[in-house]
Image (cartoon, rainbow, N blue to C red):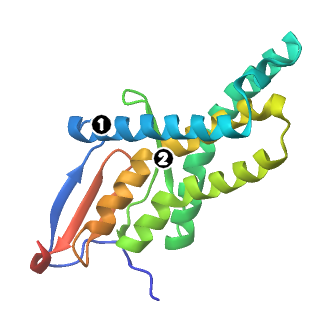
Amino acid sequence: MKKQVFWELPKDYRLQLDLRLAEDKSSLIWLTVLQLAAVVILFIAGRMRCSYEAAFSMEGYQIAIGIASMAVGIVVYIVAHEWVHGIAIRFITGQPADFGIELKKGMAYASSPAYFGKMEYSIIALAPVLFWGAVLWIMLRDVSDSWFWYLYMIQIMNVSGAAGDLYVTWLTLKAPKGTIVKDSGTSMLFYAPETAV
């Protein structure tokens, strides 16, 4: 199947949606609800695997190491999440992604000047949650109960933090046939052929 990637907006395409998640209050409410639901479900699932008390069953210095490791892991994960978006962009376009940080909005991002077809953009959006979800799941299978929650908190962040990616994927897949998406990192522009608008 031929990749749908354009470096210029095709003729007769018109803007259908300008989505700025950090500024759209309605979207932010839904994303917050989705994130909270994911956190609750994952905490319940984690509790079925291991008690909360296990995280505090070690010596005091080991607990401090666990908390520090978790904090470092979360920071590394944020960078790694965007890195995987960038790898997916590079795989699909053959060109490196642009990376940035929007301090006022508290977000890091990977972006591209390309316009992506629905399937290509969905792959880019979902790549981090699927890749890191699998890596963390494999790691969690063999971790001891004492260390489980310190690592599992990163998995919780992976899934709940992907709420925006999941929401954008849902919007992309339900968009009219022929829709293409340009992602600047802080906004997603959805274009559709005039016949589909």
Q: Separation of disc 2 and disc 1 at Cα?
A: 13 Å
Is the C-beta separation of discs 2 and 1 under 8 Å? no
Tell me the residue at 36%/35% (across/down): 32
Judged from this view, the residue extending furthest toward the top is: 60
The secondary element bearing badge 1 is classed as helix
Tag 1 residue: 28
Tell me the residue at 28%/35% (across/down): 29
Judged from this view, the residue extending furthest toward the right is: 59
Amino acid found under the numbered disc labelled 2: Ala
Find residue 9 and report its horizontal and vertical position in percent.
Answer: 25, 71
Q: Earlier in the sequence, mark 2 or mark 1?
A: 1
Q: Nearer the viewer, residue 166 or 59?
A: 59
Instruction: Give the number of the disc on residue 102.
Output: none
Mark 1 neighbour density, 10 Å: few (under 14) some (14–19) many (20 or more): some
Q: Is residue 101 something one can see in this rendering?
A: no
In the rendered view, would you say 161 is above or below 7?
A: above
Q: Nearer the viewer, residue 39 or 23?
A: 39
Amino acid found under the numbered disc labelled 1: Leu
Q: Is residue 196 something one can see in this rendering?
A: yes
Residue 40 horizontal side relative to residue 190, left or right: right
In the rendered view, would you say 14 is above or below 81?
A: below
Tag 2 residue: 162
Find residue 16 and report its horizontal and vertical position in percent.
Answer: 16, 62
Residue 102 horizontal side relative to residue 126, left or right: left
Quadrant assignment for the C terminus: bottom left
Find residue 72 and report its horizontal and vertical position in percent.
Answer: 70, 28
Tell me the residue at 58%/58% (across/down): 130
The secondary element bearing badge 2 is classed as loop
Judged from this view, the residue extending furthest toward the bottom is: 1
